[in-house]
Image (cartoon, rainbow, N blue to C red):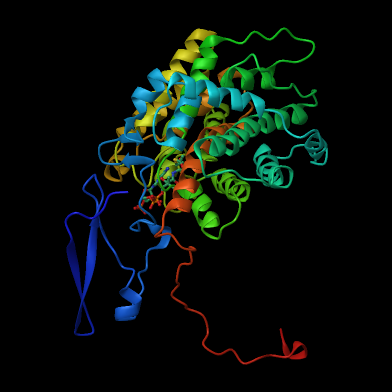
Amino acid sequence: MGENKNPETADLIFDGKKISLPVRSDNQGQKGIDIRTLRRDAGLVTYDPGFANTASCQSSVSHVDGERGRLLYRGFAVEDLTENCTFVEVGYLLIHGRLPTRTELEKFSALLNRHSMIHEDMRTFFSGYPEGSHPMAVLSAMVVSLSSFYPELEESETEELDITATRLLSKLRTIAAFSYKKSIGEPFVYPSYKLSYCANFLNMMFSSPVTDYQIDPVLVRAMNKLLILHADHDQNCSTSTVRLVGSAAANLYACIAAGICALWGPLHGGANQEVIEMLERIHREGGNVDKVIERAKDKKDPLRLMGFGHRIYKTYDPRAKIAKTICTEVLGKLGVKDPLLEIAMKLEEKALADSYFAERKLYPNVDFYTGITYRAMGFPTDMYTVLFAIGRLPGWIAQWQELKRDPEQKIWRPRQLYMGADHAPFVPMEKRG
Ligand code: ACO
């Protein structure tokens, strides 16, 4: 966390009084007014719905440069990491702040294997869910249940932290695959020590006692890349949720479960499912993209172009670029001709040429092309956000850990501007309505 080397102040005149507030700078030139004394000195609070102008913390985990379309994990460009690393390596990088040596990676991978099974008693939980339960509901409930089975949390030394991190990373993947198997009525496939993280996941998802499932290295590579693309994204909604819950000193499992719930929202990670549903609708209705674009522009219509727009990116999301390449590679390798890809490309082309989207700087985001790839790989639509959660987990763990180690952090407790009644006279039951 960088120290403020160039102290500046921002002056605010309010009620005839000048209040000088210190200005902090991050290492990318973003300046932030430190308002911690504002209420004490001026009786003022700030009003910022959606926290669009608020830095909630100082962080070194990842950086999103929305103007230049850059994404860094611990300083490394996401493009370099997707090209050269496995998801496990990137997970280590985020959690430990540096790339692992070969020995460290081997140890970390061995721990992932050791912790890959879930307690046998947890298997029975799956049968309690009604048919058609969304796997995100199952995932969040299962993750918070882990706190009962594995209450001890190691977080201090490298090796101890690795136990907690690998336990979560490995079990989340197993829970995800089990919830899918349960939803289709097939027996669970256990993780195998012989397989890598992503190969293991594909095997748990798609092999069965009666099939000879061949793990395709092209799909393993694509899976690694897709998970890396999702691994962290500074203070987004689910990460902020993890930090918010963590600020109350809740245990890590509870924080991650809360993050999963936030991610489920269609304006956040749930958008990847919504994109496919939108593309399918367009396909069913004859493939007319113009109609959808017109509807998305109409302020009276609640429809938004899913997979488009971002709070921070005001240019092409770098993840979307990589996701588009992965998508064409996977479909090409599998020989899949998906009409939804054509519709997506037409939609993108038309939207980018439209002044509504250009003026608002709305570009495809990471969710726009990932769903088509997952579909070609055989994942059902409601698993897409689960895949996002598996990818985002190392980021959540790293951010939670950073919060715990940050002496400036305290319980998150925003203020409000109260607009309700000042004194409502009590009305007895018989006089109500
Ligand atoms: N389709 C149509 N119009 C849009 C879209 C869209 N997808 N996104 C934003 N706009 C318009 C808004 O209506 C608004 O227009 P106005 O200025 O005329 O009122 C303007 O663009 C700014 O939009 P906001 O909603 O203020 O932007 P915000 O930063 O709050 O929202 C968000 C960002 C939620 C991602 C938004 O762009 C959206 O809803 N996109 C679709 C959902 C989606 O793809 N979510 C995934 C995001 S990536 C992720 O979380 C992994």
- Residue 64 point in image, percent of width and height: 33, 40
The reply, left or right, for residue 168 in relation to residue 15 is right
- Residue 76 point in image, percent of width and height: 33, 30
Q: Quadrant of residue 428?
A: bottom right
Instruction: Count up the numbered dots.
Output: 0
The reply, left or right, for residue 236 in relation to residue 277 is left
Q: Residue at x 35, y 58 (%)?
A: 54
Closest to the observer: 183 or 338? 183
- Residue 50 point in image, percent of width and height: 42, 58
Decide if residue 256 is in sight here: yes
Which quadrant of the rendered structure holds the C terminus?
A: bottom right
- Residue 42 point in image, percent of width and height: 30, 80
Closest to the observer: 125 or 66? 125
Tell me: residue 86, above or below residue 294.
above
The reply, left or right, for residue 219 in relation to residue 193 is left
Decide if residue 337 is in sight here: no
Q: Residue at x 79, y 41 (%)?
A: 129
The reply, left or right, for residue 182 in relation to residue 96 is right
Closest to the observer: 431 or 272? 272
Q: Residue at x 19, y 85 (%)?
A: 16
Closest to the observer: 59 or 11? 59
Q: Residue at x 48, y 10 (%)?
A: 332
